[in-house]
Image: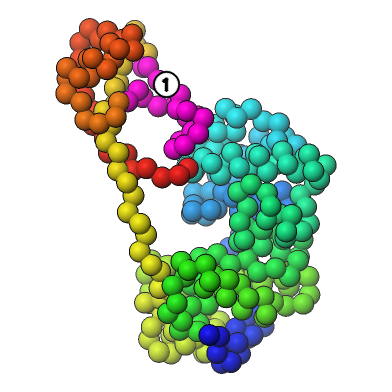
Amino acid sequence: MVLLEDREILAQLPGLLLPWYDGGARVLPWREEPTPYRVWVSEIMLQQTRVEAVRPYYERFLEAFPTVEALAAAPEEKLLKMWEGLGYYNRARNLQRAAQQVVELYDGEVPASYEALRALPGVGDYTAGAIASIAFQLPVPAVDGNVLRVVMRLTDCRDDIADPKVKKAVRAQIQAVMPEAEADIRVFNQATMELGATVCAPNGPPRCLECPAMAFCKGRLRGTAEDLPVKGAKKPRRVEEKTVFLLVRDGKIALRKRPGTGLLAGLWELPAAPGVLTESQGRAFLQERGVSPGELLSLIHISEPTRLD
């Protein structure tokens, strides 16, 4: 349930955050020229990745693929090479599939519609809201983990932020207090995210004395801010044990390409066998595949946590 006092708290945010953001927001390359394509690329890169890690990749990626058309037509090997090191490679593949749809359906112009953006591969509620509001100044919320944390602390709410119903409720709360002016819409969403990233931050106590909303933040006033937000435990990852082979011949190392679907799809890796093999089992595994090692010095065993990527 959204309390009246919570509505009144959140309604004060635009008036406080707009001047706060204008006076001290981080200078980031995707903010300097917020065209739809540049905003889109940045938001995909920033999914589950720190800002500082994204910075060097972002400019290099745009140099290689300066337009939607260039990204849509890029060979996958080049695309994945430019993404190398960022991880979660399905982000890059979905970004290219979405670019191909934009070329096919919208003549290369990123659509200025939340619904159309949301329908693109790899674009969820938050990303569609971020592109729509930042690039097109549409009055759409952009609720990421930073915004959820800010709202939960401001209202001293202990609902589980992993619950889709809670995220939907927060989106509605932010929607209700968004400013009307187009220029302010762009700034407001970025300012709310900036507050969560730099002041009302995760992984440590919030810097409440630096917060423009400190006077009415329930979490600060009640001493609960550091305990918020509440998030249900993640399911443990399933672990797969593998035996990895480092095969060397004439100074060259053998690699193989992973299948086109599943974990780390299409990437190159050292050959590996399921399970932990003995030396004799390792030899048999290689010989079945036409490899006769002259000398088998050691076997390397690793545990690989599986995830959808």
Horizontal and vertical percent for residue 257?
45, 24
- Residue at mark 1: 256
Residue segment shown in magenta: 253-272
- The residue shown at (36%, 17%) is 253
- Quadrant of the image occupied by residue 184: bottom right
- The residue shown at (52%, 89%) is 216
Whether residue 190 sits left or right of residue 202 in the image: it is right
Horizontal and vertical percent for residue 154?
50, 82
Against 148, residue 121 (above or below) is above
- Front residue of this view, candidates 5 and 287: 287
Horizontal and vertical percent for residue 287?
28, 11
- The residue shown at (51%, 30%) is 260
Against 251, residue 303 (above or below) is below
- Front residue of this view, candidates 229 and 39: 229
Magenta segment main secondary structure = loop
As for residue 268 lying within the magenta part, the answer is: yes
Residue at the bottom extreme of this rendering: 5
Secondary structure beneath dot 1 equals strand
As for residue 287 lying within the magenta part, the answer is: no
Against 5, residue 36 (above or below) is above
